[in-house]
Amino acid sequence: MERPRVIINVAQSLNGMIAGPGGRRVTISSGHDRKRVLEIRSKVDAVIVGANTVVNDNPRLTLEGHLPDHSHGPMRVILDGTLKIPENSHVLDGTSRTLVFTWNQQKDLKGAELVRMSRESLTISRILEALWAMGVRNVLVEGGKQVIHEFIDAGAVDEFHIFVGNVLIEGGGMILFDPPDDISGVMNDIQVMEGGLLISLDPHSLMISWKKKVKAF
Ligand SMILES: NC(=O)c1ccc[n+]([C@@H]2O[C@H](COP(=O)([O-])OP(=O)(O)OC[C@H]3O[C@@H](n4cnc5c(N)ncnc54)[C@H](OP(=O)(O)O)[C@@H]3O)[C@@H](O)[C@H]2O)c1
């Protein structure tokens, strides 16, 4: 079955956190890193995030006017089984198309097109299949942790970039790969950038190690 190409991008602190305590948003990216992410956004058909990312961070997921040759930007895709994102979320502001994948069969959400599926059908492979059928050929997954893990579980990752920002998040927080996740030898490339490091993982090795880890527990 064909599926869109999947790029995962995430920013983490020096101590491995992608969010502060209780999912609090922390600025980790530098100006150069934000520009790099906007450039990827400008080249994909859709940007995907989970419901908690919308609830906690309220991102716009647009091109933020940085790249004027793309007037609309990518479609915004939210995975929100229960339809918990607030009605005043930026992703519902109508500035670009927003799809919400949900198993909630009752509620409506102004500003989004709802793709209602059964709870069992809302797997990453079925979501990618549905997006492919709509003409989506490449996607950028921007978080959060649960959604990123679901893409790795599904074996649906073609590029994986982690920006490690020059930031330490104290007082606990959300770590992308929790101990005892013990995965080594998955780094492809590393670049020094303004404000941090850009690490690219080898998705193939990551997914093989991940499957071994899941079997071991
Ligand atoms: N540093 C970074 O680069 C970065 C980027 C993005 C987010 N974040 C952080 O990550 C945190 C959120 O991560 P998270 O792991 O809590 O949540 P998340 O991955 O953003 O969202 C998880 C939620 O999405 C819904 N969902 C997930 N898979 C689904 C599916 N297949 N079908 C339908 N709905 C699905 C579920 O909502 P329901 O339970 O309602 O169904 C689930 O609770 C935020 O605090 C944010 O700050 C960091």
Image (cartoon, rainbow, N blue to C red):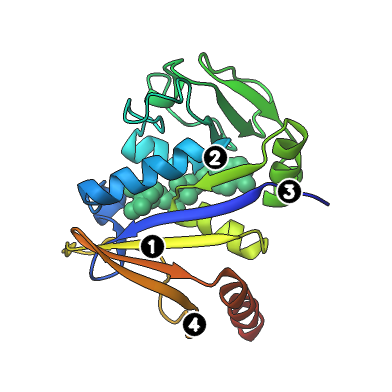
Q: How many marks?
A: 4
Q: How far across and how far down the image is residue 188, in percent?
A: 47, 75
**Label 1 secondary element:** strand
Q: Earlier in the sequence, mark 4 or mark 2?
A: 2
**How far, Cα to Cα, is label 1 from label 3?**
23 Å
For the residues carrying marks 1 and 2, which lies nearer the camera in this image? 2
Q: Nearer the viewer, residue 172 or 194?
A: 194
Q: How far across and how far down the image is residue 49, in percent?
A: 49, 42
Label 2 with label 3: CB-CB less than 8 Å? no
Examine the rendered structure and indicate whether residue 189 appears above or below residue 121.
below
**Which image quarter holds the C terminus?**
bottom right
Q: Looking at numbered disc 1 in the image, what kind of residue is underneath it?
A: Ile
Q: Residue beneath label 3, please?
A: 3
Residue 11 found in image quarter: bottom left
Q: Residue beneath label 2, please?
A: 44
For disc 4, the neighbor class at 10 Å (few under 14, some 14 to 19, many from 20) is some
